[in-house]
Amino acid sequence: MTSKGHILLVVVSISLTGCLNPVPRFASKEVAPTEYTLNESEVLQGTASYYADEFNGRLTANGEVFDMNGLSAAHRFLPFGTVVRVTNMTNKRSIVVRINDRGPFVNEREIDLSLGAAKGLGFVDEGTCPVTIEVLELGPRTR
């Protein structure tokens, strides 16, 4: 193989390798702030939204591949691995999800759910809903 052939092979290999790695949803892998004290059974209130197609298959902030049909959520400060019960205050439906991503990054929103979780809570058509978020199991704090 010629020198040009080797260079072409290397360039193609690097290009294809980049295509195989999912692109992270967010580059930041920030951990939950240590100054916020959380307790199991703590209840938060706010507005839920959901994310789906555009992020499906990308890496979440904790390094997992996002499955829009799964039961996961993004939160600004709850530690990764935290398990919460989210209740839609409009229809009283509840679902249990695990925090594996950061967000939402829209003011006035408390949690960003996967499409699967939003379907379970029955607010896909509306896009958002008022919720309570009960911490069932606090994830490990990492630094």
Image: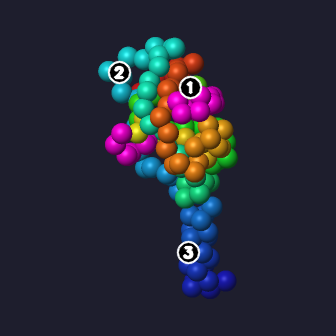
**Cα–Cα span, label 1 and label 2:** 17 Å
Q: Which residue is mark 3?
A: 11
Instruction: From the viewer's side, name the closer residue of 31 and 124.
Output: 124
Instruction: From the viewer's side, name the closer residue of 117 and 10.
Output: 117
Residue 33 seen anywhere in this rendered image of the structure: yes
| Pointer 3 local density, CA inside 10 Å: few below 14, some 14–19, many at least 20 | few
Q: Which residue is mark 2?
A: 36
Residue 22 seen anywhere in this rendered image of the structure: no
* Circles 3 and 1: CB atoms closer than 8 Å: no
Q: Which residue is mark 1?
A: 84
Q: Considering only order in the chain, which callout, 3 or 2, is on the residue closer to the N terminus? A: 3
Residue 88 location, quadrant: top right
The amino acid type of the residue labelled 3 equals Val
The quarter in which the N terminus is drawn is bottom right
Q: Nearer the viewer, mark 2 or mark 3?
A: 2
The amino acid type of the residue labelled 2 equals Tyr
**Cα–Cα span, label 2 and label 3:** 47 Å
Q: Position of residue 95 (x, y in %)?
A: 63, 30
